[in-house]
Amino acid sequence: MSGRPEEYAGPRWTDDHLDSPFPPEIKEPYFDDRLGAWILSRYADVSTAFRRPDLIPTGAKGGANNTMADKTAQMKMRAETKTALSPKHLREWQKILAPHVGTLVQGMPAGKSVDLVADFAHPACRVLAVAITGADPDDAERLEKLALHVSAAAAEPFNPEIGERAKAANTQLRPCFHSGPESLRDSGFVALTHTLPCLLANAWFALLGHPPSWKRLHKQPTLLPQAVEELLRYAGLTRLLFRRAGENIDLNGIQIRKGERVILRITVANRDTSHFPHPHHLDWAHQGKGHLTLGGGLHSCVGANLTRMAVITITRPLLERFARAEITGTVEWRGGPVFRAPAILPVVLHEES
């Protein structure tokens, strides 16, 4: 952050890092003068904010997202995306994805170090991205490298150099996608080849830190759909979302004036003891329900079912084959204030002895 102009100095919180030695601090809403925004971290406040139509999605640096601000365009895009992500299509994509994942898992060596991100998450997600967006399979790896710059800017939107690289990459990506809803073209390819692997890496990092949970899912893989909800709560990807008040509002007693910015601390709200009894432990029997990782209300993630299908389809064969795993090297992290995940996740996988 040193040497960066103050206007680009975004949030500096580290208590919501998945590898932080300290639990996140839940605070009453307050106005941060440096960031020029209200900060919400309590579960009740963030959950309420998701359901307020007068809290409008905005850019990280305060610029309005015209497409999302236009309610007609927003609703049209959501409807088109929901149609494209119908249960029928999800089943078709799952049938394409599953055999590739099975091949990848069977090819992973037991007892030797592998990188779960590069050797497993990215190749699996690339297959899904090609199936959904219609990208040229022979050009997918090149497109994935370009998409990395766009993803980096989404994770760290306050760095102008990263932003310039993302603009250049977007210029090359857009002409490669011609059909389907706008959200499932180049932006969908970016999400599937980079955001999804980041989410998987966070979930696997969490499981690696809870060996009994990994072992239980190995023995009872049918529990995975239930466990995924808890993994989304505990290790969800999106740290922050940004809003602007469309009018004067009262949010749980906090007076927010029209035009003021609001920052939602999603991962912190998912650790609020007022809603989750043991927030710093994986416990899918009693937790996970009601997590905010995929939004809520008017602003729920339209791709939530796709995300769940992908996480389950990619993770289950890994857990079924390998009874346990441990990190064997340095976990390298990538990202910024909006999201952060392991870029390298070196592990040794063990079959049942």
Image: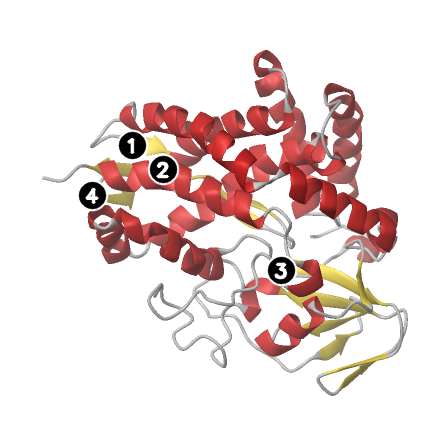
Q: Earlier in the sequence, mark 4 or mark 1?
A: 1
Mark 3 residue type: Gly
Seen in the picture, residue 117 relative to 311 is either above or below; the reply is: above
The residue carrying mark 1 is: 113
Mark 1 residue type: Ser
The residue closer to the viewer here, 314 or 261, is 314
Could you tell whether 135 is left or right of 235 in the image? right
Q: Secondary structure at mark 3?
A: loop
The residue carrying mark 3 is: 295
The residue carrying mark 4 is: 323
Q: Secondary structure at mark 2?
A: strand
In the displayed orientation, state which residue is furthest to the front: 88
Residue displayed at 80% across by 25% down: 171
Residue displayed at 61% across by 14% down: 139
Q: Earlier in the sequence, mark 4 or mark 2?
A: 4
State the image coordinates of residue 145 (x, y, percent, origin top left): 62, 25
The mark closer to the camera, 2 or 3, is 3
The mark closer to the camera, 4 or 1, is 4
Q: Earlier in the sequence, mark 1 or mark 3?
A: 1
The residue closer to the viewer here, 47 or 151, is 47
